[in-house]
Image (tube, helix red, strand yellow):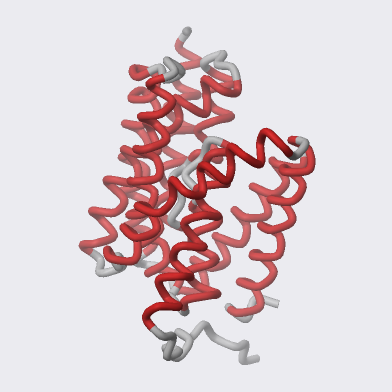
Amino acid sequence: MDALDWSGLIVLGLAAGMAGGLVGVGGGVLFVPALVVFADKSQLGAEATSLVAIVLVSLMGTWRQRGYGNVRLREGLIIGALSPVGVLVGVGLANSVPERALELSFAGVQLVFAWQLAKKAGLR
Amino acid sequence: MSRPTWRKPPARPVAHRSRVLRLACIATGAGAFSGLFGVGGGTIVVPLLVLWLGFGQKEATGTSLAAIILIGALAAATQALYGNVDLWLGLAIGVPGVLGVMAGAALQQRLSERAVATAFVVLLVASAAVLVF
């Protein structure tokens, strides 16, 4: 990789971490495309590799947010511990439902969430 | 002009068992999303904690990150078994990510719950757009 690729990775890594700390995601939304574009990874390789970064970001993010009093550890750990059930559901879905249908339905779910949160926060 | 301000919803008396059931549903949704698209699942966890369990927006942020540690670690370990993980590249992007998350978490403390909710709504719409296109 040349200098441009490295700086692209670093800038997007910073931005993804920043987004993670601000709104509580791991940053995969930005890490994955960064790895595809700047490190020439396949989609699968990028998703797998981005998980390493996501773990680092969520560890540091949890530690900092705990210091600010924003972590309800019990609830977070319950969700994390029960997530493998969901992963199995996901793998089952991936093998039985067309990928495009999955992408569109999750996009729809996110838009509904966006609408509901905006309504709740009085943003409309 | 006075606009409605963000206020924390009154804590609803949700029975303990149904709370755990809801957490299990959130876990299943996040795990499915994570398994399908290779991300942590925060875009599913945060809204459900706020809308379903009455968490404040910032509380949902920190709690979601705690959940993602486990979700991400399990997924990363599984992918590593299949040899799909490029550890050094993951660190190359994860170390700037760690600096970013420190800055992002510090910035969040200077913002209102409403501003954090706005940022999250923008991220949700962007993430939905990425899935569609």
Q: Position of residue A51 (x, y in %)?
A: 42, 33
Report if residue B74 is visible in the image. yes
Outermost residue toward the top in this view: A1
Corner quadrant of residue B1: bottom right
A84 above or below A73? above
Q: Nearer the viewer, residue B117 or B86?
A: B86
Outermost residue toward the left in this view: A67
Point 49% across, 66% down: residue: B116
Q: Position of residue A40 (x, y in %)?
A: 56, 13
Point 34% across, 46% down: residue: B70
B63 above or below B21? above
Report if residue A19 is visible in the image. no
Q: Position of residue B22 (x, y in %)?
A: 48, 70
Corner quadrant of residue A67: bottom left
Point 57% across, 46% down: residue: A89
Q: Position of residue A79 (x, y in %)?
A: 39, 58
